[in-house]
Structure formats: structure tokens, C-alpha cells
């Protein structure tokens, strides 16, 4: 009965606060009472307090309270109180309803301040720790961060390492590495906060100036590799340069080729390069030494693909060669193309190659036999992707074809582009293609459906030069001097990550390489409006590390 009475009184006071004497409601959004509470199960025990004073004592508070300092009590107060106590419960409620209607707002607020705290409960603190943590698992990470600011005990619960490990698992975060000390008690919480910060920096980060790495004079950067903190650029000036992605310094120049470097691959500190001088070279990027020079091709080495300790190279001499990187020995020669080999993929078991003879071939390198010749393109094949199930080929005939690697059957012909498909990325049956028609398209290779065309008012204004997946996003570079970021799921333009000063007047972004935390761009121009350089953007910088870097 006491509980119902207090609840009734509270509701009536709230109604009084929300509707002043003139009957008009207060403006919406204005708060007239402080806090909102939870009704504790402790109030429902059999020994329910009979008066409000009893309720205060049951809650661990003194029966004494601060009295209003308004002088002596009014005449007849005790008789009025005795009369009130003599009434029945319904009569008391009716009397209180009438009394509240005759109170001023300040008087109602005074009653609220006395009554509401008795019905507020920190239910999390009242629960066993295991049950409290179970309740917190239903909160989103952002809400957990806010809950940690409630009180000291909530902070202890919200810092629980197993709780944050589960949140990281839900977000697909498995990296616990931290590059500096964190004030968080939970390593998994630190990992979540770091990944959230990196994601925010990618999508809407401040326009921080990229680190500029100048080299190769005014030559074209033809290939770009990125591993850990090392960046390796190859150029038609016959050299490769090894850079620190942390300091921006050129650590060493790899000299030895007598012709322009046209392709490269990298694994840890091992770099393999192919040149117009018809050779491949294997380098130790940390020492700056040439470990092996691989002779065999009789024309320019135009493409290569590294898997484990074996690299497959394709040449304008129409052949492919399989090399052992550690020994420098040529293990196999694959012959069958009748024109230059332009692109190659290798998964460790099968080799797929595309050439200027309009053909795509699937090879067994061990037996040096061609398993399938995939015919259908009507012009040169410039790009390939191979995931072990599907072979995807892009051609100057404007089409993209999807083939079954095991049977050699063409399952889809993807049409929509208007020019040369120069670059593609394939992951989890999602294909992204970049074209000289200035558009990027997203496809489902299982159905052949075009999911998105990345264009609109923020689309590239010239040919797309390079593509890369990154964190559920797509990066694309272009002859228009920009690098754009797109949302893979929606196809929406997110922002321009890089925009050269000479964009639109000759500035070009030739190549891009990205990790989860960094983007490296090779830029320059064909008319002297932009000097040749590398741009490095680090998205793992918080405010403290940004100041340290500066």
C-alpha cells in the first residue's frame, strides 16, 4: 500500500510539473525533474514499509531529514495531519491530488527531491558480478564506454577483459598488438578503441598532410610494394628505392638493372623485380644487396606473382618461368602463348596467365602443361584475378569474363565498362574492376550481377589506374590525380583521401598500396606539373602520436 501511495504521489507531481496552472503544457524537451530511477526488487519484499519515513529507514537513510527553514509551523498543522491519517487510502489519494493541484511549481519540486531518490536503484551494483557482466554484454561498445563513466564500480565492470574480447570478436578484431602504452586496463578494450580510431581516420579523418618521399627524379614510378614499415618503389630509371614508412627516409637504392623496372613483388624484406633488361633480380631490402640475378627470358619481364618461395614471371617473349627465390634456379618454363604475356596469377598450385594473343591459360607448372585455354576475348588481356575457384580476366575488348578454373568454362561475361579494364581485385566472390572509362564497378562473380557502379558527381574524371580493398572499403587511384575511398557495401563515395595540387592539369596517381593502417601512393605527372614522389598517410595516429611525429 505504501509503495502504491508513493508511486501515485510521484506521478501526480510529474503531471503537475508538466502542466502549469493555466493548463498549457511546458515546451517539449524541457526536463523538470532530475534523474530517472529503477524500481528495485528490494521494495517488493513482504516487510513493505508502511510510511515514507519507514521507507527511508529501510533504504539505509536516517528518518531525520532536512526541514524547510520557514519559521514556526502553521497553526492547525497537527490537527490537519491527524485528520489526514484518519482517512482511508483512497481518501488520502484524492486529498493529495487536490493538494498537488494547489501547489506552486517550486513546492512540487521540493516534494520530488524528497521522494524520487527513494525509488532509484543501481541495479547493476546489486547483482552478482557474473550476472552484471552478462547484462553488460547486451550493450554496444559505444554504450559500454559511456557506462564506464557512471561510477567506479561500473568502470571496473566495463573494463572487464573478457567482455571486451567478446566485443572484439563480434567486430572481427583479433589483433592485440599495441604500438604504445594505453591507459586502459583491458588489452581487448585498447584493441577495440584503436581499431575504431583507425576506422574513423580512414572514413572521416582530419586532412593531415601526408609524408612526402621524393626520389626517382622526374621518372615514372612503375611498381610499388609495401610490407611492414618498408616501402619499395620501382621506376623506369632502372632502380628500386627502399623507404621507411615511419621516417620517410630513403634507406637505400637498389641498383643493378640495366633497363627500366616494370614489375615487382615483395615478401617481408625480400623483393623481386623484373626489368626491360630481360632479367629478374632478388634483393634483400634491409641490406640493399642483390641476392640473385635470374636469367632466362629473352625480352622484357612484364609481370610476376610471388607465392611462398616461388615466383612466376611473364614476358614479352611469350613464355612464363617458375623460379625458386631462395636458390635463384628456374624450375619450369611454360610455353603456349603466341604473343606477349601481360598478367599472371599463381596460387602455389596452378598458374593463370593472360596475353596479347587474347587468350587466358591455366597451367600445371609441375608438368609444364596447359590445362585449359580460355577463349572468348576479342582483344588483349590486361588484368587477371584467381581465387582457386574462379578465373576473372579483363580485356581491351571492354568485357570482363568469369571462368571456372577446374573446367575452363566461361560462366559469366560482365559488360558495362566502355574501355580497357586495367585493374581488378577479387575477394569473397566480390570483384571490383577499374576501367579507363573512369568508373569502378562492383560485381558478384557467382551471379554475374553488377552490384554497384562507383560514379556520380564525385566519380573519377579520368582513367582508373589502380585498385585495392581495405577494411570493407575500396581505394581507387586515377589519372585525374586523386585517390578516392568508396564504401564496398553501398557503393557510396566516402571521400577523396588524396588530391594532388596539379589534379586535372597533368597530375597522376600511378600506383597505390595500403595496409589496415597506412596508404602509400606513387604520384607524378607526364607534363612536368607534378614532381615524382611517394605520399604516405598513417591512419593509426592519435593526437599524442601525431604530436610526437611532428
Image (cartoon, helix red, strand yellow):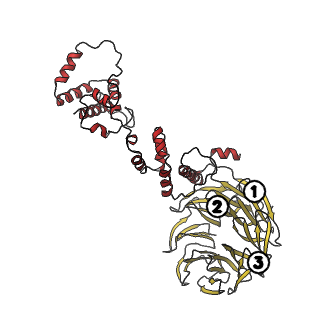
Q: Name the mark on residue 284.
A: none
Image quadrant of residue 183? Answer: top right
- Tell me the element at label 3: loop
The earlier-in-sequence mark between 1 and 3 is 1
Q: CA distance from mark 3 to mark 2?
A: 27 Å
Disc 3 or disc 2, which is closer to the eye?
Answer: 2
In this picture, is 86 found above or below 345?
A: above
In the depicted view, which residue is nearer to us: 43 or 442?
A: 43
Left or right: residue 159 versus residue 206 is left
In the depicted view, which residue is nearer to us: 441 or 92?
A: 92
- Tell me the element at label 1: strand
Which residue corresponds to the image point at 71% horizontal and 60% vertical from the top-left? 230
- Residue beneath label 2, please? 514
- Residue beneath label 1, please? 213
Which residue corresponds to the image point at 68% horizontal and 81% vertical from the top-left? 356
Query: Can residue 540 be seen?
Result: yes
The earlier-in-sequence mark between 1 and 2 is 1
Which residue corresponds to the image point at 64% horizontal and 61% vertical from the top-left? 514
Query: Can residue 19 be seen?
Result: no
Q: CA distance from mark 1 to mark 3?
A: 28 Å
In this picture, is 445 found above or below 456?
A: below
**Pointer 1: residues within 10 angstroms few (<14), some, or many (20+)?**
some
- Residue beneath label 3, please? 300
- Tell me the element at label 2: strand
**Pointer 2: residues within 10 angstroms few (<14), some, or many (20+)?**
many
Amino acid at each position: 500500500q505504501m509503495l502504491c501511495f508513493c508511486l501515485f504521489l510521484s506521478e501526480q507531481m510529474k503531471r503537475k510539473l508538466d502542466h502549469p496552472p493555466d493548463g498549457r503544457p511546458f515546451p517539449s524537451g524541457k526536463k523538470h525533474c532530475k534523474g530517472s530511477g529503477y524500481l528495485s526488487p528490494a521494495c517488493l519484499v513482504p516487510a513493505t514499509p508502511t510510511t515514507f519515513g519507514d521507507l527511508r529507514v529501510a533504504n539505509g537513510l536516517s528518518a531525520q531529514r532536512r526541514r524547510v527553514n520557514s519559521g514556526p509551523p502553521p497553526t492547525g498543522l497537527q490537527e490537519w495531519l491527524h485528520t489526514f491519517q484518519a482517512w482511508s487510502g483512497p481518501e488520502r489519494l484524492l486529498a493529495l491530488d487536490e493538494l498537488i493541484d494547489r501547489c506552486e511549481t517550486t513546492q512540487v519540486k521540493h516534494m520530488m527531491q524528497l521522494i524520487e531518490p527513494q525509488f532509484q536503484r543501481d541495479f547493476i551494483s546489486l547483482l552478482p558480478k557474473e550476472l552484471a557482466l552478462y547484462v553488460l554484454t547486451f550493450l554496444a561498445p559505444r554504450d559500454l564506454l559511456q557506462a564506464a563513466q557512471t561510477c567506479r564500480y561500473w568502470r571496473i565492470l566495463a573494463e572487464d577483459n573478457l567482455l571486451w574480447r567478446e566485443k572484439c570478436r563480434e567486430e572481427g578484431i583479433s589483433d592485440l598488438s599495441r604500438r604504445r602504452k594505453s591507459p586502459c586496463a583491458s588489452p581487448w578494450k585498447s584493441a577495440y578503441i584503436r581499431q575504431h580510431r583507425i576506422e574513423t581516420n580512414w572514413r572521416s579523418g582530419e586532412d593531415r598532410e601526408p609524408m612526402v618521399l621524393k626520389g626517382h627524379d622526374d621518372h615514372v614510378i612503375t611498381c610499388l610494394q609495401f610490407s611492414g614499415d618498408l616501402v619499395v618503389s620501382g621506376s623506369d630509371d632502372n632502380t628500386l628505392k627502399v623507404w621507411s614508412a615511419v621516417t620517410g627516409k630513403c634507406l637505400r637504392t637498389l641498383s643493378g638493372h640495366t633497363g627500366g623496372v616494370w614489375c615487382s613483388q615483395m615478401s617481408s624484406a625480400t623483393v623481386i623485380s623484373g626489368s626491360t633488361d630481360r632479367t629478374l633480380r632478388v634483393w634483400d631490402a634491409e641490406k640493399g644487396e642483390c641476392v640473385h640475378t635470374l636469367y632466362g627470358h629473352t625480352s622484357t619481364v612484364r609481370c610476376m606473382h610471388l607465392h611462398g618461395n616461388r615466383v612466376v614471371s611473364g614476358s614479352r617473349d611469350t613464355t612464363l618461368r617458375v623460379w625458386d627465390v631462395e636458390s635463384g634456379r628456374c624450375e619450369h618454363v611454360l610455353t603456349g602463348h603466341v604473343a606477349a604475356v601481360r598478367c599472371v596469377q599463381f596460387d602455389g598450385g596452378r598458374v593463370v596467365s593472360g596475353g596479347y594473343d587474347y587468350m587466358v591459360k591455366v597451367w600445371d607448372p609441375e608438368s609444364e602443361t596447359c590445362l585449359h585455354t580460355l577463349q572468348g576475348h576479342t582483344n588483349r588481356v590486361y588484368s587477371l584475378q584467381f581465387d582457386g575457384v574462379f578465373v576473372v580476366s579483363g580485356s581491351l575488348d571492354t568485357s570482363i569474363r568469369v571462368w571456372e578454373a577446374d573446367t575452363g568454362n566461361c560462366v559469366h561475361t560482365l559488360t558495362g565498362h566502355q574501355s580497357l579494364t586495367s585493374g581488378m581485385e577479387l575477394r569473397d566472390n566480390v570483384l571490383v574492376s577499374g576501367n579507363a572509362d573512369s568508373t569502378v564497378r562492383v560485381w558478384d562473380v557467382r551471379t554475374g550481377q553488377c552490384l554497384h557502379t562507383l560514379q556520380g558527381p564525385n566519380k573519377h574524371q579520368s582513367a582508373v589506374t589502380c585498385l585495392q580493398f581495405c577494411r570493407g572499403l575500396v581505394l581507387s587511384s586515377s589519372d585525374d590525380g586523386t585517390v578516392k575511398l568508396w564504401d564496398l557495401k553501398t557503393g557510396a563515395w566516402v571521400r577523396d583521401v588524396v588530391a594532388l595540387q596539379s589534379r586535372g592539369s597533368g597530375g597522376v596517381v600511378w600506383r597505390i598500396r595500403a595496409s589496415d593502417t597506412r596508404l602509400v601512393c606513387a604520384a607524378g605527372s607526364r607534363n612536368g606539373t607534378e614532381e615524382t614522389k611517394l605520399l604516405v598517410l598513417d591512419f593509426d595516429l592519435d593526437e599524442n602520436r601525431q604530436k610526437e611525429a611532428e
